[in-house]
């Protein structure tokens, strides 16, 4: 094409005009044809490429849909298994609760009526059986609570209550536990107004926190309970002088079945469910819970309740 152009330009100067025009026209025509052929080729290639991309897009969409469906099936299968497991735990725990409660009453009566008549060894054996039985009741209650939390069926029945009376009542009921470790408990009353909350659930939270504050306390330690009114909530704190929690263990506290591995706690009995249940209940009551601790010095657990 290039040489044709040179030749035709040469003709323009030496030959009559048609000798110039014809080769120029020919050159132009060849160039146009070449461009047309090349562009058609490119267009075809572009169309093929577009077609390929469209097919690829369809294939990717189809595969994604298939994977999503398989994933959904897997999730619903897992959910079904989890639901069956939760139901099993709930039914097993529920069925166990009735006979275990009956055993507890029976033991209590036997110990009470046998105090004068039974010999020392038999009485001690009965008391030990009663202790183990009450630990079993606590475990069953924790499992029932976890099953209810997982199933979302935990019931909250709110009413107007005097929160300070509930705290005092709970301390009284737990007196034998505090005595067993010679732990001194103080409660700083503030004359707080009545609040609208669930008294049984609140008691459950207090029992869990006070049990831990005793279990993980030192012999002759102390527990301070305080209550304060903030903008739109009350804050209740339970502070102990116990073994404390290491910084790196703090995030394990409120997790299900989570117990802290430590030389100091290895002999303390527990399931790692108490704080998980406590957190869920506080949240159902509309509040929040957190903890602060210094290893070897003690811990403070604080929870809030909306006014
Ligand atoms: P459990 O007491 O049955 O093990 P919890 O859920 O009540 O279960 O507590 C989880 C863990 O948190 C305990 O195993 C213990 O290591 C730690 N913990 C809880 N409360 C205290 C506390 N007041 N002082 C020190 N450690 C605590």
Image: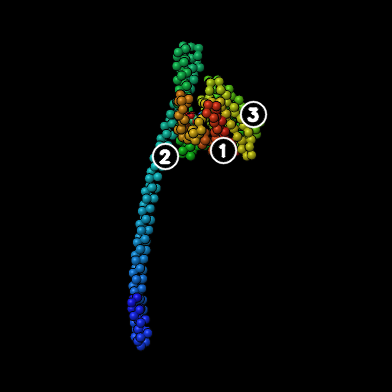
Do labels 3 and 2 touch, CB within 8 Å? no
Residue 173 in view in this figure: no
Q: Quadrant of residue 48?
A: bottom left
Residue 266 in view in this figure: yes
Please state which of the two labelled residues, at mark 2 or mark 1, is closer to the viewer: 1
Q: Quadrant of residue 87?
A: top left
Above or below: residue 19 compared with residue 66: below
Above or below: residue 193 compared with residue 178: below
Residue 83's disc is 2
Residue 45's disc is none
Check the picture and name the quadrant holding the C terminus.
top right
Location of mark 3 (residue): 189
Residue 141, image x and y in percent? Answer: 47, 30
Residue 124, image x and y in percent? Answer: 46, 15
Q: Earlier in the sequence, mark 3 or mark 2?
A: 2
**Side of 237 relative to 265 (left or right):** right
Cα separation, mark 1 vs mark 3, equals 20 Å
């Amino acid at each position: 094409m290039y040489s044709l152009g040179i030749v035709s330009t040469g003709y323009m100067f030496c030959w009559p005009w048609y000798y110039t025009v014809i080769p120029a026209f020919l050159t132009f025509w060849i160039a146009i044809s070449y461009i047309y052929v090349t562009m058609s080729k490119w267009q075809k290639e572009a169309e093929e490429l577009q077609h390929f991309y469209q097919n690829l897009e369809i294939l990717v969409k189809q595969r994604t849909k298939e994977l999503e469906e398989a994933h959904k099936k897997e999730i619903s299968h897992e959910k079904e298994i989890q639901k069956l497991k939760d139901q099993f735990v709930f039914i097993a725990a529920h069925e166990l609760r009735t006979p275990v409660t009956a055993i507890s009453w029976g033991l209590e009566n036997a110990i009470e009526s046998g105090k004068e008549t039974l010999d020392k060894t038999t009485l001690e054996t009965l008391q030990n059986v009663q202790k183990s039985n009450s630990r079993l009741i606590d475990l069953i209650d924790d499992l029932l609570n976890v099953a209810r939390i997982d199933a979302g069926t935990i019931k909250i029945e709110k009413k107007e209550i005097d929160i300070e009376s509930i705290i005092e009542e709970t301390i009284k009921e737990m007196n034998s536990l505090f005595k067993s470790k010679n732990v001194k408990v103080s409660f700083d009353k503030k004359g707080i107004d009545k609040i609208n909350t669930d008294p049984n659930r609140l008691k459950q939270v207090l029992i869990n926190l006070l049990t831990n504050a005793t279990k993980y306390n030192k012999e002759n330690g102390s527990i301070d309970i305080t209550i304060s009114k903030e903008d739109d909530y009350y804050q209740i704190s339970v502070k102990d002088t116990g073994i404390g929690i290491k910084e790196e263990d703090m995030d394990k506290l409120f997790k299900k079945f989570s117990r802290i591995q430590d030389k100091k706690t290895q002999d303390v009995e527990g399931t790692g469910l108490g704080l998980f249940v406590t957190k869920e209940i506080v949240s159902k009551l509309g509040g929040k819970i957190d903890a602060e601790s210094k290893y070897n010095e003690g811990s403070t657990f604080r929870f809030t309740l909306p006014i």
